[in-house]
Image (tube, rainbow, N blue to C red):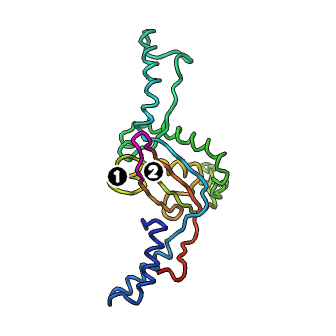
Amino acid sequence: MNLSPEEQRAALAALRWAWDKLPQGLGLPAFRLAERIEREGFGIGAHVFRLELPFQGDALALARPVHRERAKLRKQLGVKRLPAGMGPPLVERPYAPTMNEYANLRTFEKDKLRKAIDGVIFGLKARWPAWNMGVRAVGVLRGAGKKQRAGVDLVGGRRRVAVVTRFSSQPVDEISVDILGGKMLIDRLVAAHVLRGDDAEWLARVPRWKLAAPEEGRVVVDVHEIEPLTVPEGTP
């Protein structure tokens, strides 16, 4: 259900208020909709993690002076590759790619970006002590006989909410986590065990867009615990 908790509460409250005022034939569909909202709805609880990354263009702009300086040194030395330790070090600038940007990356570029984002997440865990969603690794044996191998299964964990917000100077055509640039960030949060999974069983998604100045574009993923959806009694 692609509704924010606020929209879910509003819809459920409106259905309850208008229950006996609906035209004939709409009562059963309205009842089923209310049941679905109560079953699938969720509230946003404790804030347990935040991942914030710039857009691709901004990240590349930050790295460009280093690349120019290294290219200048290579030209002065007449070499194609600088010796180890010479020149300003190359620093991977992680960013939040859109679906099209990710699709256009070469395999080694995707690997480098994953590792860079993983490094950011690892560094943030000390700042967010409640990041772990309760999963634990259990050793298992797979296969039989000579083909038997040791493996690891993940056990436990709990469902969480990911609020993905894109801050940009231009609105987006569609408000969804993937379109906003949150897909790869969600994938890496799953790999880091901040999230148990990226399907509806383990993750509720809340996509948002907010206006920002051109130089302040970014994608922010706020991870929260899930709370039951509540609508105050007597809400009109």
> What residue do we see at 58% from left, 44% from top?
121
Q: Mark 2: few, some, or many residues within 10 Å (few <14, many ≥20)?
A: many
Amino acid tagged 1? Val
Nearest-to-viewer mark from 2 and 1: 1
Q: Which quadrant, please, contains the N terminus?
A: bottom left
- What segment carries the magenta color? 210-217
* Residue in front for this viewpoint, 48 or 136: 48
**Residue at 53 percent of width and 60 percent of height:** 161
Q: Is residue 69 above or below residue 180?
A: above
Residue 150 lies left or right of residue 92; in this view the side is right
Q: Is residue 137 above or below residue 43?
A: above
Label number found at residue 172: 1
Q: Does residue 216 show up magenta in the picture?
A: yes
**Residue 163 position within the rendered picture, expressed as x and y whole percent measured from the top left:** 50, 57
Give the mark nearer the N terminus: 2 vs 1: 1
Kindly indicate the quadrant of the structure image that contains residue 153.
bottom right
Q: Which image quadrant is residue 47 in?
A: bottom right
Q: How many marks?
A: 2
Q: Which residue is mark 2?
A: 182
Q: Secondary structure at mark 2?
A: loop
Determine if the magenta segment contains residue 10: no
Q: Amino acid at mark 2?
A: Gly
Residue at image point 55% right, 74% down: 230
Asked whether the residues under the numbered discs 2 and 1 touch, taking CB atoms below 8 Å apart as contact, a structural biologist would say no
Q: Position of residue 9 (x, y in %)?
A: 48, 73
